[in-house]
């Protein structure tokens, strides 16, 4: 069953720039795939449409069977609770500890504290940061910060993980680490969609590839 | 439901912690709100005291009814019976003209002048004590007594009470206007404070949206912040007003002692304090609501 399905989706930004032109594809539940293309091809825009951060000007975006493009704004938070987002420039909060950063998605959705804390520690353990739970994120290295973002994205056990250039600012070793994590999540049934222009990375994992070129799917 | 309560508690705790984290800015805000509220509330308290005073003084309103100098014994008796029969009269005291003259001589020290007069210039008079102190019924009785035969003049001791009443009404209107204006100031102060808070928490708000926080979840802490600021400002206003009244009372008691009276300003009642606190919190909430609608909406779609 398709968990994400786009049909003839277009997105035009104010000013006339067409970021996406009649894009159609679907993603099966439990699939892992890459989204690639040159810088400015529309990768980020596509992910934003799926997460309802932007709205399409035409076509339909179905996520979990719900039409995101016509969703009421009050329903969007509940859609996002099923999504794990690892976006570029998505900030960690430096006024609280590593642990509290991972707790945030659970606090926001009103999980009981004890259960939430257990899950936060489990997520930190998975990304290898459990020993640093009391640290301030500002003291973490770039790779560790990115891993913390991943822990925060998966702590809610989302059905879908969307990652936008998750390895962009990392050296090769760290990048591999992150991709291994995504692959591991995918093996336990999470649908993973990774936008990247790193051809080496794509070559190493034999997954389906969506290629965007000037807003059009090749 | 439990999660909802939990989050409310959490929001409140976080808001309080946030206020405590920047004590100087919080104190300045609270003082600004407190002073803005203390002004109308203080004037209101003074007016309430003046009004209580005017009621105490006019508790026994009196009318003095002067008869014509050539009134006969029979005329006097007729007037007396009419006065006693009138509705709303509690007591009638007769002051014969001879007694009035000796009283005047005794109290005014004008014995020599009085002795030199060829005849007593004073008329017989009645002092009528009314059972009710409201100016309207007193006016009615005054008119009624004026129309009695052989009555030349009726003197009401109520004129100054009426004047005071009118002044108090004016004062109350002034207080209402002042309260309205300074209430707006309170709303403005919280509006701006919340705006700054939203700006400093911009990243956190944006992140919370991305991880599935509802609009209500994001707004809630700011509503608490506004209401809490208002409430603290209200407490500051109460402190200022009560402190000022207690301080004034110390000086006033010295003055009152000289005049042999026990004049004291009474403090606001618990109900009045409750109303001030509730109004302050409500205005703070309003300021927060305006600010949140204005500054958070842009990110919501």
Image: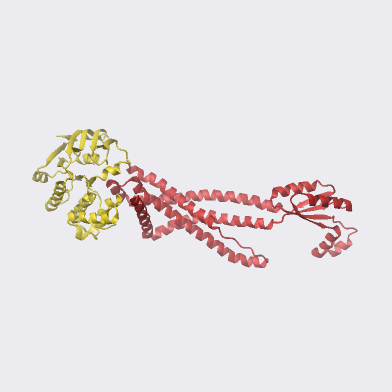
Q: Nearer the viewer, residue B240 or A13?
A: B240
Q: Judge left or right: residue B207 versus residue B128.
A: left
Q: Nearer the viewer, residue A189 or A192?
A: A189
Figure label count:
0
Q: Is residue B8 above or below residue A14?
A: below
Which quadrant of the figure contains the C terminus of chain B? top left
* Chain in yellow (letter): A
Is B165 on the left-hand or right-hand side of B220?
right
Q: Residue at x 29, y 37 (%)?
A: A71
Q: Quadrant of residue A125?
A: bottom left
> Can residue B32 be seen at all in this image of the molecule?
no
Q: Taking the image as drawn, is residue B92 in sight?
A: yes
Residue A26, percent from left and from top: 18, 36
Horizontal and vertical percent for residue A57? 27, 33
Q: What percent of the width, then of the height, locates residue A87?
A: 22, 46
Point 64% across, 63% down: residue:
B263
A178 versus A214 height, above or below: below
Q: Position of residue A18 (x, y in %)?
A: 23, 34
| Residue B129 vertical placement versus B108 (above, below) | above
Q: What colour denotes chain B?
A: red
Q: Is residue B66 left or right of residue B219?
A: right
Q: Nearer the viewer, residue A174 or A106?
A: A106
Residue B252 appears in which quarter of the rendering? Answer: bottom right
Q: Would residue B122 appear left or right of B293 to someone viewing this image? A: right
């Amino acid at each position: 069953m398709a968990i994400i399905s786009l049909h003839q989706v277009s997105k035009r930004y104010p000013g006339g720039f067409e970021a996406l032109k009649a894009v159609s594809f679907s993603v099966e539940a439990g699939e892992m795939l890459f989204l690639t293309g040159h810088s400015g091809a529309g990768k980020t825009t596509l992910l934003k449409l799926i997460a309802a951060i932007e709205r399409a000007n035409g076509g339909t975006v179905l996520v979990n069977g719900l039409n995101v493009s016509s969703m009421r704004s009050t329903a969007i938070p509940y859609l996002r609770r099923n999504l794990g987002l690892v976006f570029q420039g998505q900030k960690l909060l430096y006024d609280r500890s590593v642990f509290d950063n991972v707790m945030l998605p659970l606090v926001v959705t009103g999980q009981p504290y004890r259960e939430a804390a257990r899950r936060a520690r489990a997520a930190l353990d998975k990304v290898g940061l459990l020993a640093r739970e009391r640290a301030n994120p500002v003291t973490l290295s770039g790779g560790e910060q990115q891993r913390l973002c991943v822990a925060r994205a998966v702590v809610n056990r989302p059905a879908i993980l969307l990652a936008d250039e998750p390895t962009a600012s990392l050296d090769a070793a760290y990048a591999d680490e992150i991709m291994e994590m995504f692959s591991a999540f995918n093996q336990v049934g999470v649908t993973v969609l990774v936008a990247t222009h790193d051809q080496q990375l794509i070559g190493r994992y034999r997954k389906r590839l969506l290629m965007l070129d000037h807003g059009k799917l090749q | 439901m439990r999660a909802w309560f939990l989050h409310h508690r959490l929001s409140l705790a976080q808001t309080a912690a946030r206020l405590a984290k920047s004590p100087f800015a919080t104190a300045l805000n609270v003082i600004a709100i407190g002073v803005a509220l203390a002004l109308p509330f203080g004037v209101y308290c003074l007016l309430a005291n003046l009004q209580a005073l005017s009621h105490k003084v006019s508790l026994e309103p009196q009318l003095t009814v002067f008869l014509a100098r050539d009134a006969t014994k029979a005329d006097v008796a007729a007037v007396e019976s009419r006065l006693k029969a009138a509705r709303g009269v509690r007591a009638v005291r007769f002051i014969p003209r001879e007694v009035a003259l000796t009283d005047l001589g005794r109290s005014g020290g004008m014995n020599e002048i009085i002795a030199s007069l060829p005849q007593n210039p004073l008329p017989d008079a009645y002092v009528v004590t009314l059972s009710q102190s409201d100016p309207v019924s007193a006016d009615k009785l005054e008119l009624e007594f004026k129309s009695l035969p052989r009555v030349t003049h009726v003197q009401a001791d109520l004129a100054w009470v009426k004047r005071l009443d009118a002044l108090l009404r004016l004062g109350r209107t002034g207080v209402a206007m002042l309260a309205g204006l300074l209430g707006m100031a309170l709303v403005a102060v919280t509006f701006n404070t919340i705006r700054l808070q939203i700006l400093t928490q911009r990243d956190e708000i944006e992140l919370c949206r991305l991880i599935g926080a509802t609009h209500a979840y994001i707004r809630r802490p700011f509503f608490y912040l506004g209401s809490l600021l208002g409430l603290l400002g209200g407490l500051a206003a109460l402190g200022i007003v009560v402190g000022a009244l207690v301080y004034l009372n110390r000086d006033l008691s010295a003055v009152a002692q000289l005049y042999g009276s026990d004049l004291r300003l009474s403090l606001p009642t618990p109900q009045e304090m409750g109303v001030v606190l509730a109004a302050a919190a409500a205005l703070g909430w309003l300021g927060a609501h305006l600010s949140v609608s204005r500054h958070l909406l842009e990110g919501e779609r």
